[in-house]
Amino acid sequence: MSNILILQGSPRANGNTAWMAEEYKKAAEAAGHKVTLVNVAKKKINGCLACEYCHTKGNGQCIQKDDMQELYPLLAEAEVLVLASPIYYFTLSVQIQAPIQRFYSMMKPANVKKTALLLSSHSPNVYDAAIAGYKLISGFCGYEDTGIVTAMLDEQKTDATRQKIANLVKNI
Ligand SMILES: Cc1cc2nc3c(=O)[nH]c(=O)nc-3n(C[C@H](O)[C@H](O)[C@H](O)COP(=O)(O)O)c2cc1C
């Protein structure tokens, strides 16, 4: 059984992305996995300062003492990393990009083996940039992509999308 961390990057607590993240959590817990779900959009997580403190005298520690400090231990323990984001201007939300870019102090979460991506949007055909970024990051870190579920307007909060997410969990 795997230790799964879901980062949910929409500020809307009862929105479509939150629903997708919850469905993933429910299906993964039903399969016996340990799941931690964090709404990173509700956290105070700044962008990376590029100060290089972490790679010099900080010895891997980030100098910024914001809510990212809660996430670092969760990231260090996670074996599966799930990113859930709304599409904002054709890409991942800033709220989820901030913690991803703050991986920099650890370069990559060391125990993660597998990843998944959940995306929500208004329109079809708006996922290319988010998917490309996700695949590049997952590949750069040497992780295995277990799959992607997208849900535009009339696919949101449906049984069909719930089933796609449940199928994704089977790839862990
Ligand atoms: C700032 C902002 C930018 C958005 N940009 C896009 C976009 O480029 N393409 C699109 O299809 N939907 C866009 N949307 C719509 C959201 O992606 C869509 O409503 C999504 O389901 C919201 O997820 P949520 O319910 O989890 O917040 C945008 C919404 C916001 C607030």
Image: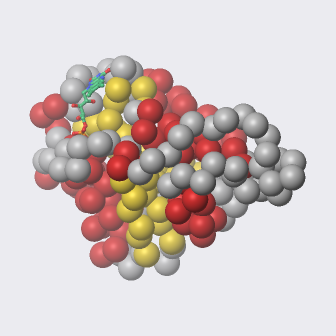
Q: Is residue 151 above or below residue 84?
A: above
Q: Left or right: 48 with respect to 134? A: right
Residue at the spot 53% in from the left edge and 40% down from the top edge? 46
Question: Image quadrant of residue 87?
Answer: top left
Q: Left or right: 18 with respect to 88? A: left
Nearest to the observer: residue 26 or residue 44: 44
Q: Position of residue 92 (x, y in %)?
A: 43, 32
Nearest to the observer: residue 143 or residue 75: 75
Instruction: Indicate the quadrant of ligand 1 in the picture.
Output: top left
Q: Is residue 68 above or below residue 152?
A: below
Q: Position of residue 16 (x, y in %)?
A: 21, 43
Q: Is residue 105 above or below residue 154?
A: below
Q: Left or right: 66 with respect to 124? A: right
Nearest to the observer: residue 37 or residue 11: 11
Q: Is residue 89 above or below residue 144?
A: above
Nearest to the observer: residue 5 or residue 74: 74
Q: Position of residue 48 (x, y in %)?
A: 63, 38
Q: Is residue 172 visible?
A: no
Residue at the spot 50% in from the left edge and 55% down from the top edge? 67
Residue at the spot 51% in from the left edge and 71% down from the top edge? 3
Q: Position of residue 4 (x, y in %)?
A: 47, 66
Q: Is residue 6 visible?
A: yes
Question: Image quadrant of residue 15?
Answer: top left
Q: How is the image coloured?
A: secondary structure
How many labels sit on residues? 0
Residue at the spot 32% in from the left edge and 42% down from the top edge? 10
Q: Residue furthest right?
A: 56
Question: Image quadrant of residue 125?
Answer: top left
